[in-house]
């Protein structure tokens, strides 16, 4: 700013000085009537004035050229500057075209972006809709799954009930078949008994005796012969036979010797049961077998023999059948422990009718929600029978 003001001031001063000098020179030339190039003084004065103006312009330009590079470029590098300007104009045109192209590309990109944005918004809305449907379907699926699980549980429960009923049906059918066979056998025996023909049934225990341990062979023979003699006397008495020489009991010598060998010298007491090998028809001899076992103490008096909840039989709707099933399981358990069953009935003991009715009534009173505890009335050995007491307790009352 300061340099520009100084240059402007210098130009004014120089212009004034040159004008003053030109005027003075012109005045002197006019006064002295000087001529230049043979011209009249008047014209010479004009020429001097013109030369002064030219000097003023020249000095102005010269000073400007000296102090200002832009003036020098304008005076001496104008053509080059013009060429550069042309080049720059061309570059500007190229840049403008590139700019236009860039604008068009930008517009295209903006349009693509708008399209993508629009599609993205549509996709987002579609995603929200799908997500909403997914949540709804999951809720529906959960409801259906719950219903399916409930139905499946019902089906499985029904299937188990059907299986239990089928099992119960099979057991009842088997029991019915067995009872029918027993019924037929009993009817045949009844008919035979009515006709006075059958005296003893096959499998019937005629008598049983406990033999001490460490017996000699001779002692064993005496015991077995004594038992057979007692049975013979019993049969003769039933058949009203008075002849002492008649022998109604028959056993093979091999079976007798095997029994003696098993009993003699045994370390434990032996239970010997004499069993009818076949039905005894009046007037015929009875074939018998020896059924020999260790006579061990199985349950002590007051000992808990068996204990169980009737929940195990809840598939059976009838309380009487539940109790009978419990007693059947008790019968199997006692046999597994060593109590010998009756060869004909297969039972190890019998619960008296009134006791059985009392147990069933208590079970009914408790709605089947009870526990049955069986204890031995006395010491129970292998020979049985199993004499028991049955205690019925409501579930939750017992410790």
Image (spheres, rainbow, N blue to C red):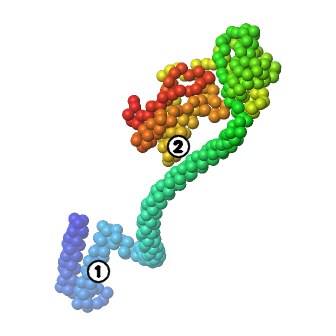
Q: Nearer the viewer, residue 87 or 381?
A: 381
Residue in the foreground of this view, choosing between 161 and 288: 288
Label 1 CA crowd tier, 10 Å (few <14, some 14–19, many 20+): few
**Earlier residue among tags 2 and 1:** 1
- Please tell me how crowded label 2 is: few (under 14), some (14-19), or many (20+) other residues with Cα within 10 Å: few
- Residue at horizontal 63%, vertical 19%? 295
Structural distance between the alpha carbons of marks 2 and 1:
149 Å
Q: Nearer the viewer, residue 31 or 141?
A: 141
Residue 271 in picture, x, y percent from top left: 66, 19
Q: Which residue is mark 2?
A: 321
Residue 252: where, in percent of width, then height? 81, 22
- Find residue 395 and report its horizontal and vertical position in percent: 41, 37
Q: Residue at x 68, y 30 (%)?
A: 204
Q: Secondary structure at mark 1?
A: helix
Residue matched to label 1: 54
Q: Nearer the viewer, mark 2 or mark 1?
A: 2
* Quarter of the figure with the C terminus: top left
Is 283 situated left or right of 9 in this image?
right
Residue at the image point whose x is 78% and y is 30% from the top: 284
Question: Which quadrant is home to the N terminus?
Answer: bottom left
- The answer to whether any part of residue 22 appears in the image is yes
On screen, 367 above or below 162?
A: above
Quarter-wise, where is residue 211 in the image?
top right
Pick the residue in front: 239 or 59. Answer: 239
Q: Is residue 120 left or right of residue 272?
A: left
Q: Is residue 244 above or below residue 110?
A: above
**Quadrant of residue 217 in the image?**
top right
């Amino acid at each position: 700013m300061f340099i520009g003001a100084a240059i402007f001031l210098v130009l004014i001063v120089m212009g004034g000085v040159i004008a003053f000098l030109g005027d003075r020179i012109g005045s002197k030339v006019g006064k002295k009537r000087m001529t230049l190039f043979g011209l009249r003084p008047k014209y010479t004065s004009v020429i001097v004035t013109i030369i002064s103006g030219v000097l003023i312009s020249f000095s102005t330009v010269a000073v400007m050229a000296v102090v200002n590079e832009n003036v020098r470029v304008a005076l001496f590098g104008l053509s080059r500057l013009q060429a550069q300007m042309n080049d720059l104009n061309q570059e500007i045109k190229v840049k403008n075209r590139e700019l236009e192209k860039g604008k068009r590309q930008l517009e295209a990109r903006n349009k693509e972006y708008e399209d993508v944005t629009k599609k993205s918004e549509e996709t987002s809305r579609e995603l929200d809709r799908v997500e909403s449907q997914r949540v709804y379907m999951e809720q529906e699926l959960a409801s259906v799954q719950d219903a399916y699980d409930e139905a499946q549980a019902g089906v499985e429960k029904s299937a188990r009930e059907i299986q239990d009923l089928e099992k119960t049906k099979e057991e009842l059918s088997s029991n019915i078949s067995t009872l029918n066979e027993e019924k037929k056998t009993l009817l045949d025996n009844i008919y035979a008994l009515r006709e006075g023909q059958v005296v003893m049934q096959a499998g019937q225990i005629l008598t049983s005796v406990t033999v001490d341990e460490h017996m000699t062979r001779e002692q064993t023979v005496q015991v077995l012969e004594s038992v057979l003699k007692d049975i013979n006397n019993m049969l003769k008495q039933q058949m009203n036979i008075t002849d002492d020489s008649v022998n109604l009991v028959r056993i093979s010598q091999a079976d007798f010797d095997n029994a003696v060998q098993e009993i003699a010298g045994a370390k434990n007491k032996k239970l010997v049961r004499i069993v009818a090998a076949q039905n005894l028809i009046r007037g015929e001899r009875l074939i018998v077998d020896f059924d020999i076992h260790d006579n061990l103490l199985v349950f002590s008096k007051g000992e808990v023999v068996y204990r169980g909840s009737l929940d195990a039989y809840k598939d059976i709707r009838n309380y009487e059948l539940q109790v009978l099933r419990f007693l059947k399981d008790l019968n199997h358990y006692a046999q597994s422990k060593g109590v010998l069953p009756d060869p004909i009935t297969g039972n190890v003991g019998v619960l008296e009718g009134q006791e059985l009715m009392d147990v069933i009534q208590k079970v009914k009173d408790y709605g089947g929600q009870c526990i049955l505890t069986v204890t031995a009335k006395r010491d129970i050995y292998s020979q049985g029978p199993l004499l028991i007491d049955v205690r019925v307790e409501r579930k939750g009352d017992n410790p």
